[in-house]
Amino acid sequence: ARKTHAKHYLPALILLGAELGASKQELLDLDWSRIDLDRGTIHLRRDKNKTERTLPLMNRSLEALRHWREHLDRERTRKGILAKSDAVFCQQDGTPFQSFDSSYRRACKLARIKDYHFHDNRHTFCSNVILAGGTLKDAQELINA
């Protein structure tokens, strides 16, 4: 992911998918007001089933989000851009990304990973819950809670 043109934001997206089981839409809808970088927490909202969950951020996800935020702030300051939204994953002017599929496919291609879709990160998260001693029900509750 760090070898693509999306090197500043794509690592955060991938890590949030794999470490929190976040869906693509949860991440595309995410605002900075829902992330506490000091406390290391994130508040995700699922529109699909109208549920919300507050989760601790793992160190890699937290650092990737900090890097993305610092990059956005630095570029906006350098170019004199005022963001028109609080979206986390957005253009420098604050326009939220509609998708990141092409960047994700490019990263998979560079890593020589075939047939791995972003949604598969949710499966990775659930597998990790089970490998850590959780049950299928635990994984389901964590991903949907």
Image (cartoon, helix red, strand yellow):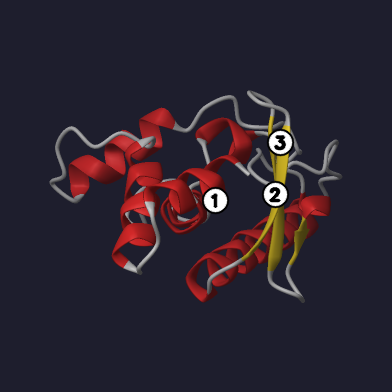
Q: Is residue 130 above or below residue 53?
A: below
Q: Quadrant of residue 46?
A: top right
- In the image, 2: left or right of 34? left
Marks 3 and 1, Cα distance to the nearest angstrom?
11 Å
- Amino acid at the residue labelled 3: Thr
Residue drawn at (35%, 69%) of the image: 132
Q: Local crowd at mark 3 within 10 Å, few (<14), some, or many (≥20)?
A: few
| Percent position of residue 23, x then y | 52, 37
Which residue lies under the disc numbered 3? Answer: 51
SS under mark 2: strand
Query: With respect to residue 137, does 37 lie above or below?
Result: below
Name the amino acid, label 2.
Answer: Arg
Above or below: residue 115 compared with residue 6: above
Residue 48 x/y as whole percent: 63, 23
Q: Is residue 109 left or right of residue 76?
A: left
Where residue 142 is drawn, which disc sits there?
Answer: 1
Label whose residue precedes the other's in the sequence (3 or 1): 3
Horizontal side of 129 relative to 42 (left or right) equals left
Whether label 2 touches label 1, CB < 8 Å: yes
Q: Are marks 2 and 3 in contact (CB under 8 Å)?
A: yes
- Neighbourhood count class around disc 2 (C-alpha, 10 Å): few under 14, some 14–19, many 20 upward: few
Q: Which residue is mark 2?
A: 53
The secondary structure type at the circle numbered 3 is strand
5 is higher (above) or lower (below) than 73: above
